[in-house]
Amino acid sequence: MRLALALLAVAASPTLALACAVCGAGQEQDRSQGAFLGTTILLSLLPLAMVGSFAGWLRHQTRERRRATPDGDEPTA
Amino acid sequence: MQPGATDRALSTLARGGRSIENGVLGMAIAVLVEVMLFAGFISAFVIVRAGTPPGLWPPPDQPRLPAPTTAFNTAILIASGVMLFLAHRAFSRRGPRPAARRMGIAILLGGFFVVFQGVEWARLLAQGMTLTSSQLGAFFYTIVGAHALHAAAAIVVLVVHWRWMRFGRLSPSAFGASQLFWYFVVLMWPVIYLQVYL
């Protein structure tokens, strides 16, 4: 039981062991890569999401207008 | 193949039966462009912050950004957006007079936000944070300054439309466009606050 608890504690709390002064140097690079990846995804998907949302809203508006005019005629401006 | 609703919407627009008012459509396109501008600013900020060695962001020699007081100011700006929405509802249900009162409150709250930001800027400048003092300063004044510029421009538009509303000359299209602009200013700010201040 104690062994199982000890193994669980070790498995649940892993920490990075840095053996020398320069071992942490790569961490900034990892964070930078993560930031580049995240912002690339954001800037790629954001225009698509916005245009898609706008098209969806336009579609919703058109349906509402059709529902408001039961004979199906397009209302004139 | 049956034409989809989006196709019908586009053909409705082409035939002149409007699914969307011209003013709102123009403002929606402008807002899409502005959202991308701020997304670019914030992305650059996030990348620069991530490239800083641990413990050096925010820069130790720079003043801390006033996050608690700006949180209060954020609440004021959101209240302004809510008030403008209530003005919209009053405009469509009860007419211009009750709507003008709510719109006036929204403008006052928005004006308070811009003035409060100005006071915070003056304080930060006095403490030594300028556009060239650090990367944080450069990004802070660029991003927050661009937002403040949009907020000030939107308030001018809202004031003009408020006057038109009082005299019964405000069209739903113009009101929709100014609302959209202000909602953009209101909704963009919490994103900026979370990324830059916290």
Image (cartoon, rainbow, N blue to C red):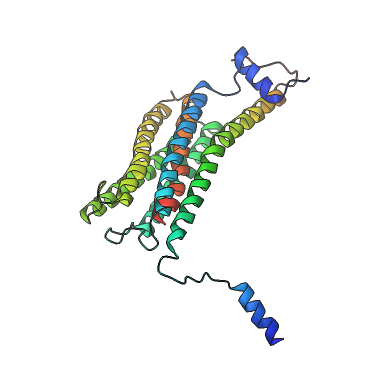
User: Can residue B75 be seen by looking at this rendering?
Assistant: no
From this view, report whether residue A24 is shown above or below residue B130: below
Measuring from the top left, give residue A40's x and y in whole percent.
51, 42
Q: Residue furthest bottom?
A: A2
The foreground one among A17 and B189 is A17
So how many labels did they put on this image?
A: 0
Q: Quadrant of the C terminus of chain B?
A: bottom left
- Residue at (75% x, 18% y) in the render: A71
Q: Position of residue B35 (x, y in %)?
A: 47, 37
* Residue nearest the observer in this picture, A48 or B168: A48
Residue B190 appears in the figure: yes
Question: In the rendered image, which quarter contains the N terminus of chain B?
Answer: top right
A35 with respect to B6 (left or right): left
Extreme residue toward the right, this view:
B1
Q: Is residue B19 left or right of residue B85?
A: right
Place of residue B34 in the rendered image (x, y in percent of width and height, measured from the top left): 44, 34
The residue at 58%/36% (across/down) is A49
Question: Which residue is painted at 37% across and 36% down in the image?
Answer: B150
B167 shown above or below A74: below
Query: Left of B161 or right of it: where is B93?
Result: right
**Quick one: B143 or A6, which is closer to the camera?**
A6
Residue B140 sits above or below residue A26 on the image: above
Hey, which quadrant is residue B169 in on the image? top left
Residue B97, image x, y percentages: 45, 33
Left or right of B131? Residue B55 is right
In this rendered view, identify the residue nearer to me: B197 or A59: B197
* In the image, residue A66 above or below residue B57: above
